Image (cartoon, rainbow, N blue to C red):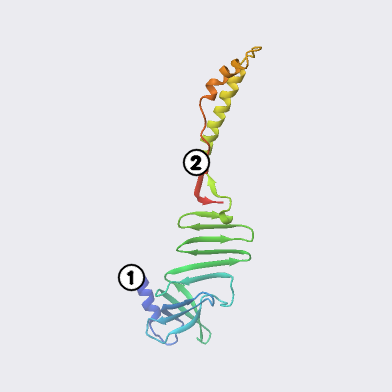
Amino acid sequence: MSDLRNIIRQLAQPDGETVALVCTVDAIDKAARTVDCSPINEGAPLLGVNLQANQGADFGLCLFPEKDSYVVVGFVADGDAGVVLLTEKIESAEIVIGGTSVVMDADGCRIDTEKMSAHINRDNIIFNGGDLGGLVRVEDITKRLNLIEKDINKLKTAMSGWTPVPQDGGAALKAAAASWAGSQLTPTKRGDYENTKIKQ
């Protein structure tokens, strides 16, 4: 942290022609992709400082600094136009390349393409809007399928050991299936195997 202070002091020292100023951010305009800031050398406030080369563009890389954080502002050619070169703290970052965008902030990271999306938030991850529900917990669904398969195998064993007896009214079949029919399976609920923290 002391190194950062020394760098800021060196950049802020007037030595003739100023090419960069260390400032604190007063306001952020995300739509215009600019900031208003005040130089720490108590010079006049700088208004509408660009956050990227073409402030009218809504693509490329743009870092939005936090209010009251430090930024280094560089000046182009005659010194009339300023651009943020470095930021201390970032409120959010945007990257737009073609039809793909990535937005990162304190709430998480949102990636959107023309056909797919992945939103990583504080509490969950949502793929493609999450309309299909939570991701399947493989271990839990495997246990449930094994339980059903064992039950079917018990029925197969009971049926394969049964020998038809003429005119007994089905008594032999009932006796063969009695051991299997006595244990009932409980209906499966979605919560038995769904991971609601990852939605697809």
Q: Is residue 172 above or below residue 79?
A: above
Q: Earlier in the sequence, mark 2 or mark 1?
A: 1
**CB contact under 8 Å: marks 2 and 1:** no
Relative image position of residue 46 (x, y in whole percent): 45, 84
Q: Which mark is residue 166?
A: none
> How far apart in space, not on screen, are marks 2 and 1 (Cα)?
54 Å
Pointer 1: what residue? 2
Give the quarter of the figure containing the N terminus: bottom left
**Residue in the image at 48% along x and 79% along y:** 74
Residue 161 seen from this side: no
Q: Is residue 109 left or right of residue 70?
A: right
Relative image position of residue 86 (x, y in whole percent): 46, 73
Residue 159 seen from this side: yes
Q: How many marks?
A: 2
Relative image position of residue 66 (x, y in whole percent): 43, 72
Which residue is nearer to you in this view: 58 or 23?
58
Residue 97 falls in which quadrant of the image?
bottom right
Look at label 1 and name its amino acid: Ser
Q: Secondary structure at mark 1?
A: helix
